[in-house]
Image (cartoon, rainbow, N blue to C red):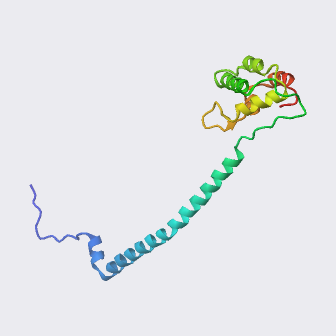
Amino acid sequence: MKTKPKNIKKLGNPALLIAGSSAGQKAITNASENQKAVVQATASVIPFLIKTIVIVGGGMYLYYRFTNRFVSLKENSNYPISNITNNQAITKAETIYQAMLGFGNGFEIVKTNIAGLNYNAFIKVYNAFGHRQGTVPFSDKMNMVEWFSDQFNESELNQLRFLVPNMF
């Protein structure tokens, strides 16, 4: 078995040699000053970022608040008065929504609830329907006419248009 001689000199850690030199000390001082400058620059940017986020967020809130709102229709006095009450309109709107919400489009149920409505009665049902959440998660809210366009094909829409002309 061989033994190592004990008097061999090792190089040691070269990083310690450089850090111990005057150039190494200068580099460490410069790095520390650079870190301070970076922290100060970052701290000066944070208020700008917060203001920007608040302004952009507020603008988006206002935009979506006013563009996605429901605008109710007014009854037309040139047509006969509604042939249903407000409570009947609410019931019909809920029935129509539930028919379209589940599996399938519930066309026959919708057709039955629309049949016999005059112009102003359709307006009442439309207003009672309001904006309802779509079937797809995170989709926009839609009014009754938008739901019809989303759920029914052109042939079914034509049948509904025949029941309540000049509405959609």
Picture layout, residue 29 above or below residue 95: below
Nearer to me, 123 or 135: 123
When asked about the image quadrant of residue 115, the answer is: top right
Residue 62 visible within the image: yes
Name the side, left or right, on which 23 lies relative to 39: left
How many marks on residues?
0
Picture coordinates of residue 121, whole percent (x, y): 80, 27
State which quarter of the image contains the N terminus: bottom left
Picture coordinates of residue 39, whole percent (x, y): 43, 70
Picture layout, residue 6 above or below residue 82: below
Nearer to me, 53 or 18: 53
Name the side, left or right, on which 134 lies relative to 53: right
State which quarter of the image contains the C terminus: top right
Measuring 52% from the left and 68% from the top, which residue is drawn there?
Answer: 45
Picture layout, residue 115 above or below residue 46: above
When asked about the image quadrant of residue 7, the answer is: bottom left
Measuring 63% from the left and 32% from the top, which residue is drawn there?
Answer: 136
Nearer to me, 164 or 125: 125
When asked about the image quadrant of residue 165, the answer is: top right
Nearer to me, 77 or 137: 77
Measuring 60% from the left and 55% from the top, which residue is drawn there?
Answer: 57
Measuring 66% from the left and 48% from the top, which residue is drawn there?
Answer: 65
Residue 149 visible within the image: no
Name the side, left or right, on which 93 lies relative to 158: left
Picture coordinates of residue 62, whole percent (x, y): 66, 52
Extreme residue toward the bottom, this view: 22
Picture coordinates of residue 23, whole percent (x, y): 34, 81
